[in-house]
Amino acid sequence: PSATTLATALDKYALAVACAGRVRVPTTVLLGEEWTGEYPVIVKPRRGAGSRGVHVVADADALDAEGADDQQIVQEFLPGEEYSVDVIAGPDGVIAAVPRTRTRVDSGVSIAGRTVHDDELESTAAEVASAIGLVGVANVQLRRDAVGVPALLEVNPRFPGAMPLTIAAGVDMPSLAIDLALRRP
């Protein structure tokens, strides 16, 4: 990915801003800005990995106690199932998107799951990739909201650890990435 795409993907606040209006994004503010939504909420670092620093805040008093920090964000809590969508995109758009469940997660890393065919997850991930100008491979993490609509959590602009599931599902993203790099169809 380009430096601009990396900067956007690696900053969860910038990612939310870039994708708002294109896909469902949880309500997101910087820690210390006024929160007018419901509780509980999620507080997490703008930049980080492996779920480090991510925690649930139950109410307004607890959120006030967190203070103000523009390196932390507050997000709407989404109660639905979480998915990872492995995406590969070329200069002309998304080539493939393969969703999978995140059945078991350890330190933010999916250690058990299964691929699923879900047009809504695939199109949401493709729209995220388009919104940030992705060229290459990334993992788009989505979670369904209370009414079942997929919403963006984050983008990991790298090959995911569970890539063997995507390959087993019939989409060999490493080979596609080589073709992309060599400008082969």
Image (cartoon, rainbow, N blue to C red):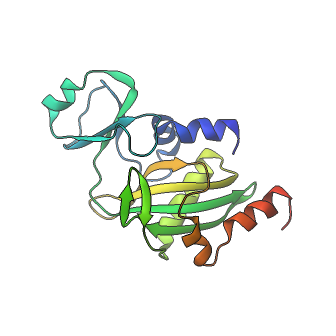
Residue 23 point in image, percent of width and height: 47, 53
Identify the residue at image location x=86%, y=65%: 184
Identify the residue at image location x=29%, y=44%: 76
Q: Quadrant of residue 42?
A: top left
Residue 19 point in image, percent of width and height: 51, 45
Identify the residue at image location x=39%, y=50%: 107
Q: Nearer the viewer, residue 93 or 61?
A: 61
In the picture, the quarter occupied by the C terminus is bottom right
Q: Residue furthest top?
A: 68
Residue 137 point in image, percent of width and height: 65, 56
Q: In the rendered view, tell whether residue 169 sits above or below residue 44.
A: below
Q: Quadrant of residue 59?
A: top left
In the picture, the quarter occupied by the N terminus is top right
Count of residue discs:
0
Q: Nearer the viewer, residue 73 or 21?
A: 73
Q: In the rendered view, tell whether residue 129 sits above or below residue 81.
A: above
